[in-house]
Image (spheres, rainbow, N blue to C red):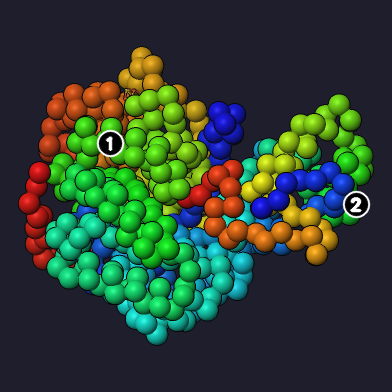
Amino acid sequence: MTGLTEELKLGLDAPICLTWELTYACNLACVHCLSSSGRRDSRELSTAEAKALIDQMAAMQVFYVNIGGGEPMLRPDFFELVGYATSKGVGVKFSTNGSRLTPQRAVELAAMDYLDIQISLDGADAATNDAVRGAGSFQTAVAAMDALADAQFGPFKISVVVTRHNIPQLDAFKNLADGYGAELRLTRLRPAGRGADTWTELHPLADQQVTLYHWLLAHPDVLTGDSFFHLNALGDDPLPGLNLCGAGRVVCLVDPIGDVYACPFVLHDEFKAGNVRATGGFEEIWRHCDLFTDLRQPQSAGACASCGQFDACQGGCMAAKFFTGLPLDGPDPECVAGHGETSLASVTPGALPASTSNHSKPVAVSLGPTR
Amino acid sequence: MARLEPEKGWQLHPRVGLRPEPFGALAYHFDNRRLNFLRSPELVALVRALPEHRTPRGAFDACGIEPRRWPSFERALHALADSGFLIPTTAENLPALETEHASQEGIVF
Ligand code: SF4
Ligand code: SF4
């Protein structure tokens, strides 16, 4: 596999994992929202521009696009765009909080081909979930899942951001998914967007990371979006996946206004590669922009070079380092060898990168009880 | 999913997309949502040539692959058949493909 990883680091002709956030509008205000969503941006791509982007994806043979937001179903042309993409052979996986997934919508979705749905849920019970995603959001997600099951949509996915508070619920999440015939997908909490403000209180503790690593090894059918490779330094058995930071190499993000970023978790000017409205569009950016060309160069291991685990963990996640103020060529803030904590201690709070993309609604969000 | 039987004709599953890449090609299975890497241009040419031949070895010959290298290409084809990316050509031989988790071979994001 190592040879392949090396080749993937040089970049691909088209992304494997292309995320497209359709809108910054959202009816919820999750405290860890990676895109600080809430308000719609008036510069949002029009239906025609969105279709032109889909045409370009089809021409590049992008196999599927991960649609998110914000809440993508809030876009009035949501069904039109999903139908357009799948008719062009671009599969769609979309993530939703479920609030617009009525029984009638579920029936429509079940009739579509090349379509995957991820329901976001961050607690296996209302108390744990709603502390992060807002009051009533657990019930909303359950109603949406019931609607999908009733419509016989087939195996949808339940998508969970792993936090300090829901790690004790891993088995409960699995049972919930099994009960629906759904697949469970666990992803890593990154300090991106509003997540930068809540990461310190929400990210898993060191002992919980060990629990998570062993749980994932015991449940190879649980999907992870390749997001926990920093845990590979915990043992000899690597978690399934590509084991690399794919930013600009196999992964990228198109945001609602057409800005292209290296990955969904780096919505910051520093990682902005261009805009799909420019000449040459998305294809030109993916293949030739300076930022992605740089990211495809061999990266230095920096302070990780002296650690025997670099091959296993690759120094972790670039976004996690950037937003916690750590050097990009050093240990991850959640480095399982504990080097992240040491580095974090020397970061002055004022030195953290300021947000350059924030669509939060002007309301205060508060966290539930902390461990 | 099916074992690759050398006496049968094989072809890509109709719901598999193949995209050329510098290292060979990326294959995506729209049914089981798995991704596979075809790690040499020769393997890509071979997979594309399969349906025109009665057996895989016929395709090896036609693609100019030397017999000493056949075992390694056979292994690659086995892996693709295991994960549902290759299917027997004859319609009545079509195995019931599992739609999810056809195999742990491919990668899912
Ligand atoms: S020091 Fe770097 S390579 Fe070693 S475990 Fe920590 S993050 Fe991974
Ligand atoms: S920056 Fe982090 S989240 Fe983004 S691709 Fe790299 S490892 Fe993944």
Name the spot of residue A199 as percent of width and height, x first. Answer: 19, 45
Image height check: is A103 above or below A93? below
**How packed is label 2: few (under 14 Cα within 10 Å), some, or many (20 or more)?**
some
Which residue is drawn at the image coordinates 38% and 55% (left, top)?
A: A184
Task: Look at the numbered disc 2 and give the secondary structure of its residue.
Answer: loop
Q: Quadrant of ligand 1?
A: top left
Horizontally, residue A360 falls left or right of residue B94, namely: left
Which residue is drawn at the image coordinates 59% and 52% (left, top)?
A: B102
Horizontally, residue A1 falls left or right of residue A328, namely: right
Name the spot of residue A93 as percent of width and height, x first. Answer: 47, 63
User: Which numbered dot is residue A263?
Assistant: none
Horizontally, residue A159 falls left or right of residue B61, namely: left
Cα distance between the residues tagged 1 and 2: 51 Å
Image height check: is A220 above or below A5? below
Which residue is drawn at the image coordinates 64% and 48% (left, top)?
A: B83
Q: Give the residue pinned by disc 2.
A: B54
